[in-house]
């Protein structure tokens, strides 16, 4: 799958439909054995049966609600104990439409559990196992929503800002032999638009909506190019590099022993 030629099995969360199912398809065709995780056993089983038949790879399914601590622990254990696993696709996620104060607090809580807590715990299990073998790959599915408060997806966007930051920081800590990637899709045609209460993908501006296959193929191309941050729709990667450079320019002044002159009341700025 990667520049280092990672040949082992891939564990994919949220594999019953959408982006996770498309990753399952591509990785099976590339010869990877798979472990598919989601809540819907029927859909996982049907996908596994089709891909086994079409590609001959071995596929296990794990039925798990990743917001449930015991279910999540089973998946963590699989990542920790199964030395055949080389790749984690940390993909399962939910979104929520509407203004923050009108959102249901239990659904907000569940979104944080899935989009942040499960992503973190699974990455921890994988990173520890991969560090011991000094090989492996962790792909975290983030979102452009994490870059754009203007989209007004207060908690969803914040969970995705977390995923991007988390991936960038892991890059600084883990061995270069462990490949890391945060994928930041824009709007992509999947069921998330129905499930989140947005009214389905068809209500979106077609010029802003990417088809699922294009999204996953671009994400995999970015992976093969060794990108840390992949924004499939961004025409010029230099634009993200410039954004990141502007952020890095702040670094020398983010922590100092005195406040900035403009905050010194009574003193000239
Ligand atoms: N589509 C977009 O426009 C878009 C844009 C940016 C980022 N993303 C991100 O891409 C990722 C995949 O989204 P998608 O668009 O493919 O969504 P999707 O079509 O709704 O699929 C979500 C997947 O996550 C699984 N899932 C949901 N809740 C779960 C839970 N509690 N435990 C375990 N699995 C759970 C679902 O399976 P079950 O229901 O069977 O559990 C399903 O397989 C998410 O992280 C999302 O935030 C999507």
Image: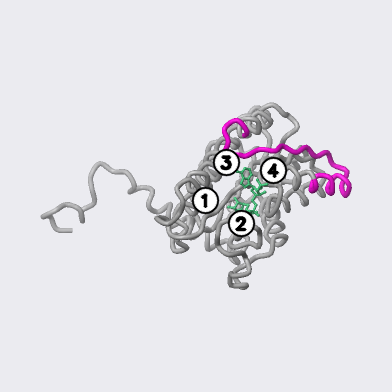
Q: Which residue is mark 3?
A: 119
Tell me which segment is drawn in magenta: 46-71
Q: CA distance from mark 3 to mark 4?
A: 11 Å
In primary-sequence order, the first of circles 4 and 1 is 4
Disc with the residue nearer the chain's start (3 vs 4): 4
Residue 257 image point, x, y percent:
25, 41
Q: Are marks 1 and 3 in contact (CB under 8 Å)?
A: no
Residue 252 in the image: x percent, y percent?
36, 47
* Identity of the residue drawn at 84% across and 45% down: 49
Disc 4 is placed on an element classified as: strand
Q: Is residue 170 left or right of residue 20?
A: left
Q: Which mark is residue 160?
A: 1
**Residue at disc 3, secondary structure:** helix
- Magenta-colored stretch includes residue 199: no
- Of marks 2 and 1, the one in the foreground: 2
**Residue at left 55%, top 45%?**
115
Visual colour scheme = one colour
Pinpoint residue 224: horizontal percent, then vertical percent.
Answer: 70, 51
Q: Would you say the residues marked 2 and 1 are in contact, meaning their CB atoms lie under 8 Å apart?
A: no
**Badge 1 or badge 3: first in the primary sequence:** 3
Q: Nearer the viewer, residue 218 or 74?
A: 74
Numbered circle sitting on residue 12? 4
Q: Is mark 2 within 8 Å of ligand 1?
A: yes
Labels 2 and 4: the sequence-earlier one: 4
The tag on residue 267 is none
Q: Quadrant of the C terminus?
A: bottom left
């Amino acid at each position: 799958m990667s520049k280092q030629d990672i040949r082992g099995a891939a564990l994919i969360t949220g594999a019953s439909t959408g982006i996770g199912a498309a990753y399952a398809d591509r990785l099976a065709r590339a010869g990877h054995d798979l472990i598919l995780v989601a809540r819907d056993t029927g859909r996982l089983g049907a996908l596994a049966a089709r891909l086994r038949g079409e590609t001959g790879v071995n596929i296990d399914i794990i039925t798990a609600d990743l917001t449930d601590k015991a279910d999540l622990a089973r998946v963590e254990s699989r990542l920790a104990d199964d030395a055949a696993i080389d790749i984690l696709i940390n993909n399962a996620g939910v979104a929520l439409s509407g203004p923050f104060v009108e959102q249901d607090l239990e659904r907000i809580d569940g979104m944080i559990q899935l989009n942040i807590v499960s992503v973190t715990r699974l990455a921890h299990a994988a990173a520890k196992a991969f560090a011991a073998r000094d090989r492996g790959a962790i792909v975290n599915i983030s979102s452009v929503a994490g870059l754009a408060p203007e989209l007004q997806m207060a908690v969803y966007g914040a969970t995705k800002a977390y995923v991007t930051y988390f991936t960038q920081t892991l890059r600084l800590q883990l061995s270069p032999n462990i490949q890391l990637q945060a994928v930041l899709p824009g709007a992509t045609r999947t069921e998330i638009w129905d499930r989140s209460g947005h009214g389905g993908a068809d209500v979106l501006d077609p010029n802003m909506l990417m088809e699922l296959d294009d999204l996953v193929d671009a994400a995999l191309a970015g992976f093969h190019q060794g990108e840390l941050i992949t924004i499939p729709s961004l025409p010029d990667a230099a634009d993200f590099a410039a954004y990141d450079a502007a952020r890095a320019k702040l670094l020398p002044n983010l922590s100092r022993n005195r406040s900035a002159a403009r905050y010194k009341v009574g003193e000239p700025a």
